Image (cartoon, coloured by chain):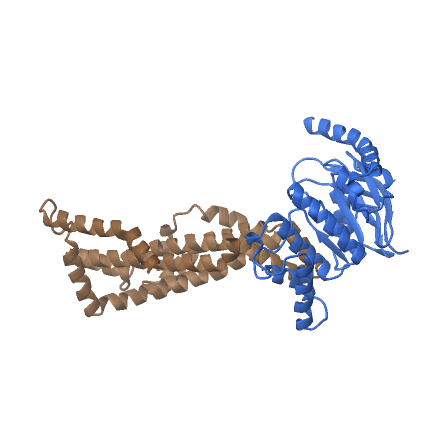
Chain colours: A brown, B blue
Amino acid sequence: MNTLSSAFLRYSPLLILALAWEVAARSGLFSSSALPPISKIAAAWVDLARNGDLAGNTLASLWRTGAGLALAILIGAILGFAMAFWRGAETALSPVVELFYPLPKSALIPVTALWLGFGDGSKILLICMGCMLPVTMGAFNGALSADRTLLWSARSLGASRLRSMWDVVLPSAVPELLNGIRTALALSFVLLVSSELIVSREGLGYLIGFLGANGTYEGMFAVVLTVAFIGFLADRIYEAFVRRTLAWRE
Amino acid sequence: MSGIVVEGLRHLYRPKRGSPVLALEDVNLRVGDQEFIALLGPSGCGKSTLLYLMGGFLPVESGRITVDGAPVSGPGPDRGIVFQHFALFPWKTVLQNVLYGLERQPMAQAEREERARAFIKMVGLSGFENNYPSQLSGGMKQRAAIARTLAIDPKVLLMDEPFGALDAQTRHLMQTELLAIWRRTPKTVIFVTHDVQEAVYLAQRIVVMSARPGRIKEIVEVGLDKADPELTRSRAFADMSDHVWSLVRDEAIKAQAGVGL
């Protein structure tokens, strides 16, 4: 109960913002297409939810982010650890990482569309490629941050070299790795929506573009707010997961 | 030949940047079974390096180190180590930390648990089995680390300034307890410190080292009765401390000057 009321207090500015929005929209200062009242947006949201547009497109988007992120985390972590453990991998990969790290990942949207078309494949590949590097860097830096006295302790307690890597280096890398994944998570939403806006016939980004182009601005705002909420929810869930995983840090 | 034998040991420290530094030169030392030895010297004298070489954590490049006649070729459970900053696995509880070494020994799981709990009790940490290291004070962390090392019953105990990060009261308590443990379960102990009183209080022999390059300057037989509760207030203790300090002082001054260069 206590946490519930403190959460309510914490997010109460949002309520005030919504109220101000409603008042401003109804005051006639803005055209109703530029700033539809929140109440109308809510009504449009209910319509979109009823006719199934929202659920269908949300599912398509979630599948793309989920699959893209999962691949990015898997491949990114393997590359990062390979670079940390094996000099050959570092020599081969670090110039590639350095080159692609500062690249605005949205520049890859036309590239992946060219390769895989307008469907799920191009979005998944885009998110995978775009989100991989923060995960790689997290795994790499995390593994390098392992304290040598921890490794030595494991070895003198009877662990083999390989075993001590597994037992010490991997857990040592977890905090940095989780940080990298958090960056990847935020990036994945950016890439998802922008690619769906440009080259897609399905998904929340597509729906935003479609409703906007048709002049159905209440609906467009409803989907934009939905995307914001999903992003917020994903971040909260992820943070709770991180807090649980890193409970030992206090 | 039983015990630890160091012969003609020389070690180059190669920093990532800059030129190599001669960390140890012509070190010769024999440590008998169940002997308590202190390696004493100013920072930079290579005493920790010598300890790490005995532990097998650093490769012996020139000279040799044998334990019971066998050359040291890597770390092993026959030589337990305790570090200044505890080196507990932060993601494991106290019990899981102490179990880590036991899990690599051939015994039943129930026996491992029982043994781990017994050692946790011995260092006075009963009730904290399920705490993470981050929830413990410095002294408690070092107790946990000592329990983890002693639980696998190493023949040799390597200690790298183990009480250096603790406050004065805790340090004194831990020194007393370490001596008590050593009397109950005698082991060969190599104890690295830069604290003269600590060395005189704990060790049977003190290996005084000089800096740059690290060499053995003198080996002092302490010859005091460690069981005497009044030991630290005795005349003999004060005289021995003065004597050892006089040996270390010049080296400390040299090391200080070296820092300024």
Residue displayed at 54% across by 52% down: A142
Q: In the picture shown, does residue B43 fall above or below B225?
A: above
- Residue A116 showing in the rendered view: no
Q: Residue B118 appears in which quarter of the rendering? A: bottom right
Left or right for A153, reference B128: right
- Name the one closer to the observer, A85 or B93: B93
- Residue A184 showing in the rendered view: yes
Residue A239 percent location from the top left of the image = 41, 56
Name, please, the residue furthest toward the front: B230
Left or right for B222, reference B132: right
Q: Residue A120 appears in which quarter of the rendering? A: bottom left
Residue A175 percent location from the top left of the image = 51, 53
- Name the one closer to the observer, B131 or B60: B131
Residue B27 percent location from the top left of the image = 84, 42
Q: Residue B237 appears in which quarter of the rendering? A: top right
Q: In the picture shown, does residue B7 fall above or below A1?
A: above
Location of the C terminus of chain B (image quadrant): top right
Residue A193 percent location from the top left of the image = 31, 56
Location of the N terminus of chain B (image quadrant): bottom right
Left or right for A167, reference A67: right
- Name the one closer to the observer, A98 or B93: B93
Name, please, the residue furthest toward the right: B1
Q: In the picture shown, does residue B50 fall above or below B118?
A: above
Residue displayed at 58% across by 54% down: B133
Counting every numbered tag in the picture gives 0
Residue displayed at 15% across by 57% down: A39
